[in-house]
Image (cartoon, rainbow, N blue to C red):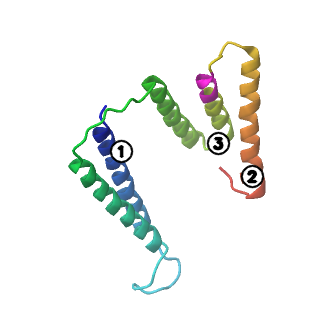
Amino acid sequence: MSLKKTSLFLLIGILILGVAYYKTASGFHNMGGSGAGDIGPGYYPKILALILIGLTIISIFQTIMDKKSEIINLGNIKMVGITLLLTLVYIFIWAKLNFFYIPTFLYLFTLIHIYQPEKNSKKVLIMNLISTSGVLLGIYLFFDLLLQIDF
């Protein structure tokens, strides 16, 4: 795939995210009894969204006007696709179950196992379990216990 097409595809995706971010920020309501001219909670996020949208549009024009065309190698596109699919499934399951730790454990373990060069060893399997458990323990200690953020 050419660098120009890939850049345009990603920039259009960023532009869509910027517009969605702006629409979300527009939905923030003032809880106080302030007037119409006051700065509300959506003011700063709207500015950030407009900056993102503006810079993305500039980058789209620069990409279109660029004369050179390079071919990029995406590497192992199969692994990229599997990772993207697993990520979408993980987000869907997390949203439906409304529980964080079990889907995250399965997601991380699966990704670590897929990218592991030696998959058939028991030692590797145990190390994957230990590393995944360690990451989740760190997330639990930092976010749940220290910051008291529930997922």
Helix, strand or loop at mark 1 = helix
**Mark nearer the N terminus (1 vs 2):** 1
- Camera-nearest residue between 54 and 106: 54
**Mark nearer the N terminus (3 vs 2):** 3
**Mark nearer the N terminus (3 vs 1):** 1
Q: Which mark is residue 82?
A: none
* Mark 3 neighbour class, 10 Å CA radius: few under 14, some 14 to 19, many 20 or more: few
Q: Which residues are magenta?
A: 111-116
**20 shown above or below 1:** below
Q: Is residue 113 magenta?
A: yes
**Which is more foreground, mark 3 or mark 1?**
1
**Which is more foreground, mark 3 or mark 2?**
2
Q: Residue at x 45, y 28 (%)?
A: 81
Helix, strand or loop at mark 3 = loop
28 left or right of 1 in image: right
Residue 27 appears in the rendering: no
Q: Which residue is mark 3?
A: 99
Whole-percent x and y of residue 134?
A: 76, 37
Residue type beneath disc 3: Phe
Per the model, the C-alpha gap separating discs 3 and 2 is 17 Å
Q: Which residue is mark 1?
A: 10
Whole-percent x and y of residue 140?
A: 74, 46
Q: Residue at x 34, y 52 (%)?
A: 16
Q: Which residue is mark 2?
A: 142
**Which is more foreground, mark 1 or mark 2?**
1
Per the model, the C-alpha gap separating discs 3 and 1 is 31 Å
**38 shown above or below 107:** below
111 left or right of 14 in image: right
Magenta-colored segment: predominant secondary structure: helix
* Mark 2 neighbour class, 10 Å CA radius: few under 14, some 14 to 19, many 20 or more: few
